[in-house]
Amino acid sequence: MVVGAHAEFGKHGIVMPDGNNVQFTHDQSENILLIGPSGAITADGKHVQLTLDGIPATRAKREVKLEGPSGVIFVDGQRRLLPPGVKIVLMTKTGAVLSNGDNVQFRKKRSSPLIDSIKGPSGYITPTGKVFQLPPGVTVAIEGDSSALLSDGTAIQFFR
């Protein structure tokens, strides 16, 4: 590969940096809606990210350690309670997208050695393991390293 060379990605195929050509099928070609310098958008809703060399990037997928009807445990230890009917629709190296539009980021905060909290529609478990029952309609409005504030104004202090 020549230094500074990059792939040419077009509607009908890719000319790789080493000179090899990848020809798209008719269906693949018709599926491409838009091509830009950093990616392509397809008619079936997929976004293809391109590397600096101009070739489609491959991503390692994270696995779910345990998934059930009410929650998910990811391989990095994060736990997420799921509302009824919500499932994982997309997994990437850095996170997951749930069917209700919520995103789960796999990278943990560096500032806190505590485990992540668990928030659900009826309860809240603090990073220190304290369990709180939430009244109907009350949610965790904001969470910091040492405390959380509920939507009804209640403050919860974490103790190490």
Image (cartoon, grey):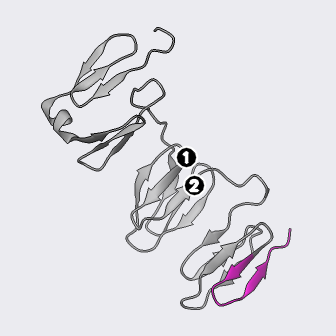
Numbered tag placed on residue 148 in the rendering? none
Residue drawn at x 32%, y 27% as measured from the top left? 9
Asked whether disc 2 touches disc 1, contact meaning CB atoms under 8 Å apart, the reply is yes
| 119 and 14: which is toward the camera | 14
Q: Give the range drawn in magenta.
A: 148-160
| 44 and 54: which is toward the camera | 54
* Left or right: where 83 falls relative to 112: left
Residue drawn at x 47%, y 8% as measured from the top left? 2
**Above or below 108: residue 2:** above
Asked which secondary structure carries label 2, the reply is strand
User: Which comes sooner in the sequence, label 2 or label 1?
Assistant: 1
**Above or below 25: residue 128:** below
* Quadrant where the C terminus is found in the figure: bottom right
Where on the picture, by quarter, is residue 112? Answer: bottom right
Q: Where is residue 143 in the image (x, y as percent from the top left)?
A: 70, 72
* Left or right: where 42 falls relative to 2: left
Residue 150 in the magenta stretch? The answer is yes
Q: Where is residue 98 in the image (x, y as percent from the top left)?
A: 43, 61
Numbered tag placed on residue 94 in the rendering? 1
Q: What's the amino acid at mark 2?
A: Gln
Residue 95 in the magenta stretch? The answer is no
Residue drawn at x 68%, y 62% as measured from the top left? 116
* Left or right: where 90 falls relative to 72: left
Q: Residue furthest right?
A: 160
Where on the picture, by quarter, is residue 73? Answer: bottom right
Asked which secondary structure carries label 1, the reply is loop
**Above or below 109: residue 119:** below
Question: Which residue position is annotated with label 2?
Answer: 105
Q: Distance between the residues labelled 2 and 1?
A: 6 Å
Q: Position of residue 49 (x, y in %)?
A: 41, 38
| 80 and 58: which is toward the camera | 58
